[in-house]
Image (spheres, rainbow, N blue to C red):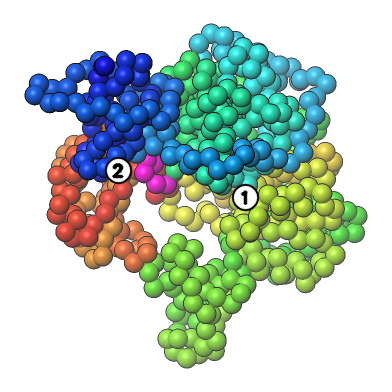
Amino acid sequence: MAFAAVYPLVSARAVARPFTYEVPEDVGCGAVVSVPFGRSRVRGVVVSTGEPPPPGVEAAPIAGVLDELPPALVELALWVADYYGSTPARALELVAPRARRRRGERRETPAGLAGEPAPAELTPEQSAAVAAIVAAMDGGGARYLLYGATGSGKTEVYLQACAAALERGLGAIVLVPEIALTPQAVGRFQARFGARIALLHSGLTEAERRDERERIASGDARVVVGARSAVFAPVRGLGLICVDEEHDASYKQESDPRYDARTVAAKRASLEGAVAVFGSATPRPESWAALERLELGGRLGGKLPPVRVVDLRREQGYPLSAPLLAELGRIAEHGGKAILLLNRRGLVPAIHCRTCGVTRRCPNCDVALVLHGDGDLRCHHCAHAEPAPELCPECGSAELARLGAGTQRLERELAARLPHLELIRLDADSSDPSTALERFAAADRAVLLGTQMVAKGHHFGGVALAAVVDADAGLAFPDFRAEERTFQLLTQLAGRSGRDAPGRVLIQTFQPDARPVELAARHDVGRFLAGELERREALGYPPFGHLVRIVVSGPEADAPMRALQELKEALGDADLLGPAPILRLRGRRRAQLVAKTDRPGALAARAGRALAAAAPAMRKAGLTVVVDVDPQSL
């Protein structure tokens, strides 16, 4: 018998360390084992072998081996725990999720939307990009930014690179940002690689996820397509990771461990000598500054569509201006499709009393309640709901104004003004995004309307019009990334139009001179990123430093501020912003402290030690804390 260091997969930070167990000689790093732990039996992961227990300690034997992980995944999980300030057990759960026992036949991989045939030949730019990726695959790995306009052929580069990986006996992972995108991406890869494709994302059932992981681990599926969690797929002999739409913020996990799949992809590629390719028509400033670029140039087979900016200050109609109605009327008369983006759910974002000036707000959160089509006011943070009042609850006035517009109001007004158009709504309230996309792909004289989900990487033929109903929705956010996200959203939506026929783009805005609007209308990505990098360098924001955000919440207003002030004093010479109060959510008062640093993992660890020392007092006060390394919003 031999000895092994095992991390029990329990969430408590008090036992966040390895324990020595007795194991058979053939058990190595990466074994998922069942071990006695206290009065129970838990799963654990072997992280090393050969170390005997301390003198006087008798190591208990493991109860059995449950599974095997590639050792590189164990190393990756331990890095995730260290960098993001989590525990090894929580990070190891990402690579060793609990699998239910099989109950019947294996399920087939769900079919995606119909894929496109391979082109007769690649463009010179595509050929050069594939050649660089393949050379790096043969040479021990690299990281690239694959940059090109929407419709420039980035997906074909991913497909060709995956084929090269398979020819070399290597595996590949392709990440997409949203589950709603996955069926279309899967269809493209299934058409090229057939049964060698596996699908992984959080929308699968536990049985489906188990089946796919088994196919990957056995080598039956060598190409994995999925959302952010697919970066931890148990692919052996990994040669390639492609991160499509790398600018998308949904690659960041919002629960512990708060990992960023883009950062994890780069680290995993480094550990396994693989190539990481980050693709986007609107790259993050961080990627633009740090990565070697493979440029594809403009759109295949044509130019990007012209963009018309509609100044809503000079228009009577909202959300449907006269120019937008005219363009939609052309589609109703002559055929074609349109995509309309309004990045707000519900019927109207707020109800406001004209008499006393009070806006109906959530009793648990510092946000306005959103009116939905069923007549309820709802909070999009805590799910509180209440019937919309006929009279103001504060003063009894009937003068209740409905402010703004959401996707449901847009849908109603389109149905009333253009009844001959088929309307397909895609937002977080939609019951089945995949069905919505399939309907739109097959339709004519149809409008796909919704939130940012409609702008994310879809490739549909016959889209003659793409329109942004309100470009100002994100500009006022108190976040240094607000302009970046607005620019990306406008540019990405514009790219959905005119891929196989002449297209048109409309941007409705009350701020036509705003930098993101002006440069998105020109499709000027380079100039926008140059200005963004100059501004961030002056302020010390990414990529010229890392951010660590620490949020404390509690039942009383003053306690989170006091806790963060004590933490600020404990962190000493760190470059810190705050503490400052932020919006109340789910009935809890919150405050945040933001650190700028070149060593985010080290600072998160220092904060973690200080918070651990204060844990008993914080628990007594009902306080909880979140440490978020490289946060995507402030």
Q: Which residue is mark 2?
A: 11
Query: What is the residue that sits farthest to the left in this orientation?
Result: 56
Q: Residue at 23% across / 32% down in the picture?
A: 17
Q: Quadrant of residue 462?
A: top right
Q: Secondary structure at mark 2?
A: loop
Q: Amino acid at mark 1?
A: Met
Q: Could you tell which of marks 2 and 1 lies nearer the N-terminus?
A: 2
Image side of residue 394 versus residue 444, left or right = left
Q: Along the line of sight, which residue is nearer the eye, 376 or 527?
A: 376
Q: Report whether residue 602 is seen.
A: yes
| Crowding near the residue tagged with mark 1, few <14, some 14–19, many ≥20 C-alpha atoms within 10 Å | many
Q: Secondary structure at mark 1?
A: helix
Q: Amino acid at mark 2?
A: Ser
Q: Which residue is mark 1?
A: 453
Q: Residue at 35% across / 19% down in the picture?
A: 27
Residue 257 covered by magenta stretch: yes
Q: Which segment did they paint magenta?
A: 254-259
User: Percent position (x, y) of residue 634?
Assistant: 39, 49
Q: Along the line of sight, which residue is nearer the eye, 389 or 149?
A: 389
Q: Is residue 165 above or below residue 352?
A: above
Q: CA distance from mark 2 to mark 1?
A: 34 Å
Q: Quadrant of residue 598?
A: top left
Q: Along the line of sight, which residue is nearer the eye, 148 or 23?
A: 23
Q: Along the line of sight, which residue is nearer the eye, 402 or 377?
A: 377
Image side of residue 440 versus residue 538, left or right = right
Q: Is residue 57 above or below residue 39?
A: above
User: Percent position (x, y) of residue 118?
Assistant: 78, 25
User: Percent position (x, y) of residue 265?
Assistant: 48, 28
Image quadrant where one finds the N terminus:
top left
Residue 305 covered by magenta stretch: no
User: Percent position (x, y) of residue 51?
Assistant: 22, 17
Q: Please name the predominant secondary structure of the magenta segment in the image.
A: loop
